[in-house]
Amino acid sequence: MKNEQELKDIVKERYAKIAEQGKAENASSCCGATTPSNKVYNIMMDDYSETDGYAEDADLGLGCGLPTQFAKIKKGDTVIDLGSGAGNDCFVARHETGSEGKIIGVDFTPIMIQKARANAEKLGYNNVEFREGDIDAMPVNNDVADVIVSNCVLNLVPNKQKVIAEIFRVLKPGGHFSISDVVLEGNLPDTLKEDAEMYAGCVAGAVQKTEYLQFIKDAGFQNVQVQKEKPIVIPDDILEKYLSTQEVKDFNNAGTGIFSITVYAEKAGTKLENPKAKLAEINDEPCCSPDGNCC
């Protein structure tokens, strides 16, 4: 397996290409990264089209769940989306926070940031911003977010424990996250785990479900819950790129489970509930107005 930086570079290059593909092509492949399946059906993502705040131009078909549906976002919240892509989850979150909230999308692919900013400008959302950076070293101060969401992204990062520690750092006391991701029960064949394309396609970078949940608990999070779980079936015509016919049969009969899960967890403490103070904090603005009226 390649080292951590090499894997990051592979993912960045792959997702730069994905940014130029259509949603149908991405949705019929494995997180948009592998050659589309001849069966042309959605392997991972859930349907956003009926979700309030959905922006079709920002939907690249790359997710594996609907974390915003479970994220308990309130009006005025500050929300961070990890691996924000073209911005769709940010725009759905913005519907929940309203204009008084603040949404920050973080992505390390420059072309994704450009697409997301263009989409935000087109929608007229001046409280949604996109920052270029790694989610394992977020360009965000401590104790900023009320809620963090992410959709099929942590599995792409080699050091998942570092990302989870970053999530803990940037969440306010009393804040929480809801993250959709890919996990395993059982072992993948080595040819899948070692292939760079399958890593960029979400599957080879997945870890065991029990290990994933333990990472979250070890970071100090409380009330860890699996809010949703669904199996993911990789079509044979994708598996056949990596496995022989017999190996495909063996894999399908081995009992190895690949799942999309949506996980919720909380950071202990008491959350500040005043939305004006939230905006002042994230924007580094004074909380009191010139006339002396304090929020």
Image: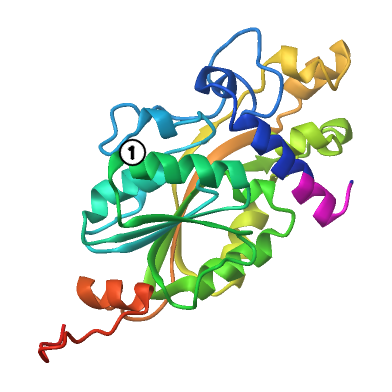
Q: Residue furthest top?
A: 38
x then y, percent, for residue 130 = 47, 54
Residue at position x 40%, y 27% from top?
47
x then y, percent, for residue 207 = 70, 48
Left-right relation of 234 to 41: right
Check the image and report above or below for 279 versus 202.
below
Left-right relation of 210 to 73: right
Q: Secondary structure under badge 1?
A: helix
Magenta stretch in the rendered image: 2-9
* Residue 173 visible somewhere in the drawing: yes
x then y, percent, for residue 286 = 28, 85
Residue at position x 37%, y 44% from top?
120
Q: Is residue 290 magenta?
A: no
User: What amino acid is labelled 1 in the image?
Assistant: Lys
Instruction: Give the overall secondary structure of the magenta segment.
Output: helix
Residue at position x 67%, y 64% from top?
161
Colour scheme in use = rainbow
* Residue 217 visible somewhere in the drawing: no
Check the image and report above or below for 59 versus 284.
above
Check the image and report above or below for 153 versus 18.
below
x then y, percent, for residue 105 = 46, 54
- Answer few, some or many: residues within 10 Å of disc 1's Cα (few below 14, many 20 plus, some between 14 and 19): few
Residue at the spot of label 1: 122
